[in-house]
Image (cartoon, helix red, strand yellow):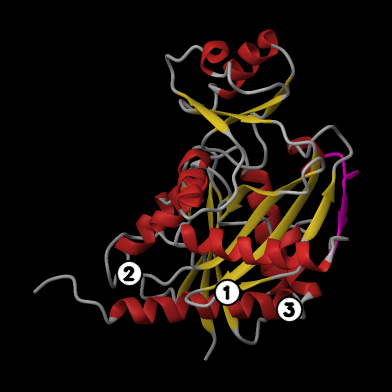
């Protein structure tokens, strides 16, 4: 009997269109002999079409498993995951805590640092902090980022105090908390991870931007960035990167899937965790499925695995007690 998969996509974030492209790729790859797909499009204003999932156990009997393909705010940050927990529905990808922790770049860094994992030095600015004064210990160039956003939206590279103030103003349009990081000159690498209790790491890939850094325009609009799978790295570096990727995944308690992004500093040959993406892209140019394809998981098989992880986790959670 076919499983009914609720594909939830769109959303209120600036990645609405990317979400739709990811959903299209997933829809085309899901085996129609195994799955019946139910579509839930969320508009940019937050309206669901058709009627939204009801946040009550048993109220969504027509759904076997949910595949949220909501990149960024109001989808990848634990909000929708909380709705699905209330509805007692299995869903693909990490849970509420991991989703929220990964979305908040400051929280992610703190959890990884506590585990002894390498993260770039950074300063966190709240609304009232003076950017230039707060960041005086960090050497230029710097990267300024909204703490909670995806697809490199609102990110700037700055070289002077004057540029810093303007970059922080831009970032604060997207989040009340802003992260300022020491700029790393080197290579941009990614590693896909999937699984629950015993996660697997893919071979890494390298992103070679066509611009100064891999921003939203370079990711989705220009089609000029190069992606190399597998990345041309020494065997020891590849092994270290895959190990750190799994440890970062576990540090924030991920389940199901994530993509861990790295920076490899040219001057020191040191790896740094840059970000953890809990709902990575599934578009035709996205690296998460490309890395797994290289590992012997073409898209249909990859989706089978991810749905299987969701159902397995839900079954184990059903065995837990929530009252005496």
Is most of the magenta stretch helix, strand or loop? loop
Residue 84 in the image: state x and y as whole percent.
Answer: 38, 62
Q: Is residue 145 magenta?
A: no
| Left or right of 128, for residue 147 | right
* Point 59% across, 35% down: residue: 121
On screen, residue 156 above or below 45: above
- Residue in front for this viewpoint, 187 or 226: 187
What range of the chain is rendered magenta?
220-230
The single residue placed furthest to the front in the displayed view is 268
- Residue in front for this viewpoint, 43 or 214: 214
The single residue placed furthest to the top in the displayed view is 162
Q: Which mark is residue 297?
A: 3
On screen, residue 112 above or below 320: above
* Point 52% across, 34% down: residue: 147
Element carrying mark 1: helix
Q: Which mark is residue 88?
A: 2
| Left or right of 101, for residue 122 | right
On screen, residue 46 above or below 65: above
- Mark 1, residue position: 306
- Residue in front for this viewpoint, 324 or 230: 230
Q: Who comes first in sequence, dot 3 or dot 1?
A: 3
Q: Who comes first in sequence, dot 3 or dot 2?
A: 2
The quadrant holding residue 291 is: bottom right
C-alpha span from label 2 to label 1? 18 Å
* Point 56% across, 32% down: residue: 122
């Amino acid at each position: 009997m076919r499983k009914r998969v609720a594909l939830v996509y769109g959303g209120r974030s600036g990645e609405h269109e990317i979400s739709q492209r990811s959903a299209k790729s997933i829809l085309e790859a899901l085996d129609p002999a195994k799955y019946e797909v139910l579509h839930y499009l969320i508009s940019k204003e937050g309206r669901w079409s058709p009627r939204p999932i009801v946040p009550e156990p048993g109220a969504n009997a027509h759904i076997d498993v949910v595949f949220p393909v909501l990149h960024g705010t109001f989808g990848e940050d634990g909000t929708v995951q909380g709705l699905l927990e209330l509805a007692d529905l299995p869903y693909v990808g990490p849970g509420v805590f991991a989703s929220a922790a990964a979305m908040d770049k400051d929280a992610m860094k703190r959890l990884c640092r506590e585990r002894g994992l390498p993260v770039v030095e950074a300063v966190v600015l709240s609304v009232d902090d003076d950017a230039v004064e707060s960041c005086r210990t960090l050497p230029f160039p710097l990267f300024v980022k909204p703490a909670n956003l995806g697809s490199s939206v609102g990110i700037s590279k700055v070289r002077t105090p004057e540029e810093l103030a303007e970059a922080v103003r831009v970032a604060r349009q997207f989040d009340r908390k802003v992260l300022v990081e020491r700029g790393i000159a080197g290579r941009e690498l990614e590693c896909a991870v999937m699984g629950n209790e015993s996660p697997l790491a893919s071979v890494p890939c390298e992103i070679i931007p066509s611009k100064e850094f891999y921003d939203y325009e370079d990711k989705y609009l220009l089609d000029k960035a190069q992606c190399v799978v597998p990345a041309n790295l020494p065997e020891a570096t590849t092994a270290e990167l895959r190990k750190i990727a799994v440890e970062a995944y576990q540090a924030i308690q991920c389940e199901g899937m994530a993509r861990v992004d790295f920076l490899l500093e040219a001057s020191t040959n040191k790896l740094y965790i840059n970000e953890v993406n809990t709902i990575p892209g599934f578009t035709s140019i996205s690296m998460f499925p490309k890395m797994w394809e290289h590992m012997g998981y073409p898209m249909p098989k990859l989706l089978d695995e991810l749905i299987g992880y969701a159902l397995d986790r839900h079954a184990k959670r059903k065995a837990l007690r929530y009252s005496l």
